[in-house]
Amino acid sequence: MKFNIFRSHDDRGSGDPTDMPRMGGQVLPAAEAGHPPEAPASDAVAPAPADATVGAAVSPRPAEPLGPIKIRARDVSVSYGDKQALHDVSVDIPDKTVTAFIGPSGCGKSTFLRCLNRMNDTIPSARVTGTIEMDGQDVNSKSVDPVLLRAQVGMVFQKPNPFPKSIYENVAYGPRIHGLTTSKTDLDGVVERSLKRAGLWEEVADRLHSPGTGLSGGQQQRLVIARAIAVEPEVILMDEPCSALDPIATAKIEELIDELREQYCIVIVTHSMAQAARVSQRTSFFHMGRLVETGPTEEIFTNPRERRTLDYITGRFG
């Protein structure tokens, strides 16, 4: 079910976004036929030799066809009081694709992620400028209901946060309050389908009325993902969803992400470059509040255009 996130049709925001995204505050020259794009002289990176360390440890997957643009951001800046956390970020995020945001702690990647479903609205000192469009509609328009927007753009946080309710009620809560079902039978079906999509049904089918907080950490995170997809979102945001999990639970979440991308636009923030290489098709590198570089994951990890990207990938900083 697709929500109408607009209260009315008379306020769609103003200003047309530019045609080309800016990477780190500048537009890189377009590639000529048969030639790769050139990076600015100050940050030029020579092609990595065959035995270089770039990509050697992470083995990113080959580039795959991308879906149409789902989210288009232009000149997005965020400040908290007098401190500016994000500077003029412009990026396109395709549909039915996993886009990874990487970078050192405090670089602005989670701040930008929170802009996509207006979570920064909950912080009194936060100020967001620029344009973020989803399917051509400005999400920051006054006509947008942020509650419905957050149902359409789900969020999975770093630490699993199931409600202090039963497993069943954790998943049923969203569809119930949004009026997505008309009967108990319909609601039962939504709960079962959501838990199956999250790869959790077989493990909890016989204890649906047990507390969600009694599950293991990895199971709780999959329960939270089931809760997010129960309201049929179009985008799923994940802020370091595996950072508190063990390797086995992490592998299950990564497998789930790969399955969900066939139906959803997924954006994941991660400090693990190996994880970004495994699960994503596009990667954006943030540094000191700026978007430095964005592109196909394979290209970012094996032949980055910017010196700062190469230094971060190879562990020289961060």
Image: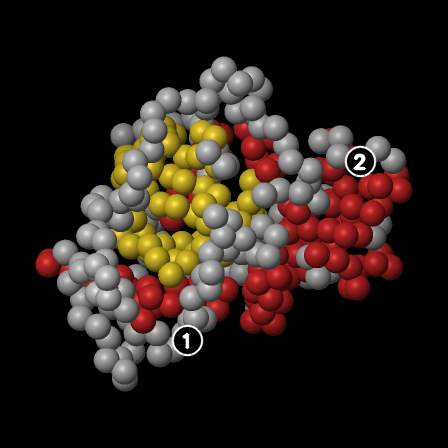
10 Å crowding of disc 1: few (<14), some (14-19), many (20+) = some
Which sits in the foreground, 188 or 86?
Answer: 188
Q: Which residue is mark 1?
A: 59
What amino acid is labelled 2 in the image? Thr
Residue 306 in sight in this render:
no
Q: Which quarter of the picture shows residue 76?
A: top left
* Image mark count: 2
| Rendered image quadrant of residue 318 | bottom left
Q: Residue at x 30, y 36 (%)?
A: 18
Check the image and name the residue furthest to the front: 33
Residue positioned 18% across, 59% down in the render = 39
Closest to the observer, 95 or 309: 95
Residue type (three-letter) at the residue carrying disc 1 = Ser
The N terminus sits in image quarter: top right
Tell me where residue 65 appears, x and y as whole percent: 47, 60
The structure residue drawn at horizontal position 39% and vertical position 63%, both measured from the top left corner, is 297
Any part of residue 90 in sight: yes
| Residue that lies at the very extreme toward the bottom in this rendered image | 51
Query: At x 46% / y 34%, what residue is drawn?
Result: 136
Dot 2 falls on a residue whose secondary structure is loop
In this picture, residue 317 sits left or right of residue 202 = left
* Labelled disc at residue 181: 2
Q: Secondary structure at mark 1?
A: loop
**What colouring method underlies this structural image?**
secondary structure
Residue 77, given in percent of the width and then of the height, sits at 31, 35
Mark 2–mark 1 distance (CA, rounded to whole Å): 44 Å
Contact check, label 2 and label 1, Cβ < 8 Å: no
Seen in the picture, residue 173 relative to 166 is either above or below; the reply is above
Are there few (<14), some (14-19), or many (20+) residues within 10 Å of tag 2? Answer: some
Residue 236 % position (x, y): 56, 47
Q: Earlier in the sequence, mark 2 or mark 1?
A: 1
